[in-house]
Image (spheres, grey):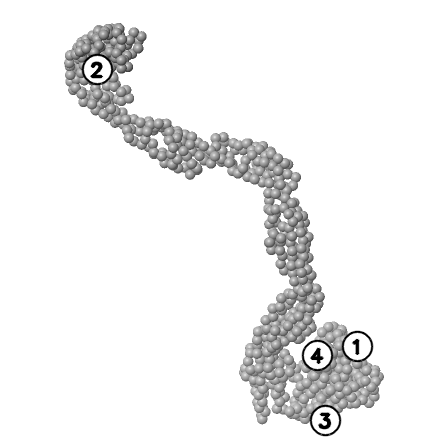
Amino acid sequence: MAQGLVPNPGFEAYTSCPNSIGNIAFAYPWGNATNISSSADYMNDCGYSMLGSWYSNSGTPYSGDGVGGIRVTTSDGANSYCEYLQVQLTSPLVAGQVYSISFYCYLGETTTGNANSLGVALTDSSIFNAAVGMSTLQGAVTPAFPQVKINTTGVWELVSGYYLAQGGEDYLTIGNFYTPVDLVMTSNYSHCFYLIDEVYIEEAEVCELELTNSITMDTLSDLRLCYGDSVTLMAHTVLSADSGYWSTGDTLSNITVQTSGTYIYTLNFDDCHLVDSIQVEFVNPPVVDYPDTLLCTDDTLQIINQDSSLVQRLYWMNILIFEKDSIDVTIPYGYELALVDGFCEGRDAFQFGFIDVPEIVPLQDTTVCALNAFNVTASAQVYDSLLWNTGSDSLTTAVMDTGMYIVTFYNKCGSQSDTMNLYLHQMDFTVSFTGDTLLCVEDEMEVLINGNVWSTLWNDSVQSNQRVLTAGNWWFEIEDERCSFRDSITLRLAEEFELDTDTLLCDDESISVEINEPWIDSLAWNEGSTNSITTFQLPNIYWVEVYQEHCVFIDSFSLEKLYTPVINKLDTTLCAGDQIYFNLNPEYSYTLNSEAIPNYFYLGQEGEYILDATNYCGTSTKYFELEGIDCSCNIYIPNTFTPDGDPYNNQFTPRSSCTFNQYELSIYNRWGELIFQSSDPEFNWDGSYKGKLVPEGVYVYILRYQALDEQDKLLTGHINVLK
């Protein structure tokens, strides 16, 4: 770049080598204030230099050996100390001409703050000859103050811009142009020290257009940003700000956009017609999903970029430490892995660490109560899988047997095992019952607990090994020197069972007995039936056994038969002048010719009669007639017969004209032995006994009979048997 209108722009020419701070006048024609206390500094390697001092630390000139310096300080926010660099131009500025103004600025590395204004003033006389203030300025590089704010220390930055001359400006001044009360430092009683180099003012080409953005601050024409972000697009022209417009319709030189598209700026001013564009694309940030990683001690984590279109970065504590496609990580810590697409970055935090073989929490040998299942639980640090010698792959495994149990934990670095022994303690006791119990006849049950029992507690707070329990729900808990055991029992009273009362049936009637209570397990009748419904018809006493679990209940009922009355044949022969005695079944009630009578009575009058016999099952009727007859009776009994086989007198034959109701003839020998008997008046004795003729002699007969008069009579006598 040509020297332009600024003499000694790089502070290379000097009248004397500086040998202390200040001495800006040695870099002639740069000047220093004459009526204010501040003094700018000049440094050059030819003599005394503040370069590397507490002002600038490691600062060196942007180019060459010389550099100017100014300091801005404040002690209480109202009073300030400001230094300025000033030079008279080689010729005054021409009115209406646009000039480009630029210089390089370096903020010292040991600076404790920075000011809110570093600007350039162009005036037609030295501003040091009057009070410093914004009102005395005739112009500046930018339309508004502050012009720039340098935030980064230890870096040379270009400050540049355009200025439309009013005419006659022949002094250039660099420094802070805020009044003391408006000057703001980042912290009270701080200082900032600036190095200034390569200061230029040149006539500028009017028809110029340059588009930049707030992300890269350069003329990059294509931007890839993340959704949700925004970017400010800036149109830089030598002309006034309203000389152009954006394709969005905005006429401001700066616009902020958040959507993808091509943004075009058009400049139209007199004969100046320029068009430029910036392509902006908003994209989703690359998806990064990197897992926490544990490697065996001294291994290296290698992270390979799988997409060459993206830039891979690794951050530690938000500090970029790697930007390459293959990253080796050897230090365990928390990191962030990033993939970058243009200016869109996606990150994922992950932890990296080292592990060794699994470290197992030692198992302990255990004695457990025999009546309880036991869960063995193992634990270890940093493992992938585990396996018990029982085959279980869970941390907790249920065991019931004594023995040794081994668990092995595995990870990528190896395996580790541990063992435990399980011993079972068997409680030694007996209980006089098992399970729930049904009380059959008694309404209580004695319970006895024997064995190695230290204490026994029942649910009614009684402590005893021997109890008499009634129906209800009971539990007890016993303890020995190590274990406890709880059991319960429900005592139930058996159901009540009773058959119906005794039953009377008539004639061919029957009765069905149904026993279907749901609690009955089985039953058995004495006549063999086991059915829930059994039919009975014959008179008898029937009993049944009913079973409810182990209980047996027995009940019975009596079945009686009653038949419809039957009137047997009646004696209707009435002996003249006599009466007939009737003695009927006393179980019936009777009427004779509709008159109630007892079961015994006399009739002595001839005639027709109607007899009714009645009981629970019904009534029978008998029609009969009494007729009077002669009832006299003569009987002839021989006293001798000769059973010798001749045609005469061979049988003992009684003779009678009687009609017998009853008849019985008996013959006995001398020893009282019965040798013949007959109830048939027509049957005769032939003198034999057991198929042989009896010997001659005297035999005794007895005749019992009843004739029509129904009087029992007896005849006796002797029989001579002759041969």
Question: Element under label 2?
Answer: loop
Question: Element under label 1?
Answer: loop
Kindly identify the amino acid type of the residue bearing the numbered disc 2.
Answer: Phe
Q: Earlier in the sequence, mark 3 or mark 2?
A: 3
The reply to whether discs 1 and 3 touch (Cβ–Cβ < 8 Å) is: no
Q: Compared with residue 428, is residue 318 higher up or lower down, i.e. above or below?
A: below
Kindly identify the amino acid type of the residue bearing the numbered disc 1.
Answer: Trp
Q: CA distance from mark 1 to mark 3?
A: 37 Å
In front: mark 2 or mark 1?
Answer: 2
Q: Quarter-wise, where is residue 139 in the image?
A: bottom right
Q: How many marks?
A: 4
The residue that label 4 is drawn on is 150
The residue that label 2 is drawn on is 683
Q: CA distance from mark 4 to mark 1?
A: 18 Å
Residue 493, percent across and down?
48, 34
- Circle 2 Cα neighbour tier, 10 Å, few/some/many (<14 / 14–19 / ≥20): few
The residue that label 3 is drawn on is 91
